[in-house]
Amino acid sequence: MQKYWSNPSTVEWCQYLLNSYAYWTKHDLLQRDGTPLTQAKQLFDHSKIIVSHGTQTDPVLNFGNHAALRLWEMDWEQFTRTPSRQTAEPMNREERSRMLAQARSQGYISNYRGIRISSTGKRFLINHAIIWTVQNASGATVGQAAAFSDWHFLND
């Protein structure tokens, strides 16, 4: 598998993810050992699902670790071209928008629960997700991210 995590802009984004998570939650998402490159690899290889999007009017996913790519059944190129709203079915998008607005206004929310859908139509329920605002080194908001490890596929 290509080392997407080693691209300089992805390494920088991973630092934003890690620093912002620690800022809002007062905890580290992972043990912060080694260089930013090492930390990017650790984030990409982490067993937790970790995803993020930017601040566009219709935000596009810009990071998904290996676990997220498997869950959403996409490769890196497809994932990072996908509007993040498409991770939820149309009937769940309003609830998703409210949750993102709440996370934006508070900095983060914990214990989020919601239904999402993979690229092949598999529906799954996520539990106990943490959603946080991603900030750059200057403190400007540059996106939002989510991390969770509790999820299961739904039988329709």
Image (tube, rainbow, N blue to C red):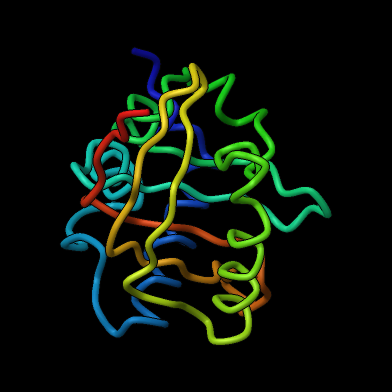
Quarter of the image where one finds residue 133:
bottom right
Quarter of the image where one finds residue 38:
top left
Q: Residue 8, how many percent across, how many down?
A: 52, 39
In which quadrant of the rendered image does the N terminus lie?
top left
**Residue at far front of view:** 156
Q: Nearer the viewer, residue 110 or 127?
A: 127
Query: Left or right: 130 with respect to 13?
Result: left
Q: Residue 20, how many percent across, how many down?
A: 45, 72
Q: How many marks?
A: 0
Query: Left or right: 108 with respect to 151?
Result: right
Q: Residue 136, how many percent across, how many down?
A: 59, 68
Residue at 41% of width from left, 33% of height from top?
A: 123
The answer to whether residue 121 is above or below residue 60 is: above
In which quadrant of the rendered image does the C terminus lie?
top left
Residue at 60% of width from left, 31% of height from top?
A: 80
Quarter of the image where one finds residue 21:
bottom left
**Residue at far top of view:** 1
Q: Nearer the viewer, residue 112 or 53?
A: 112
The answer to whether residue 117 is above or below residue 88 is: above
Q: Residue 127, how many percent across, how many down?
A: 29, 58
Q: Nearer the viewer, residue 98 or 83?
A: 98
Residue at 63% of width from left, 70% of height from top?
A: 98
The answer to whether residue 56 is above or below residue 6 is: below
**Residue at far right of view:** 57
Query: Left or right: 132 with respect to 105?
Result: left
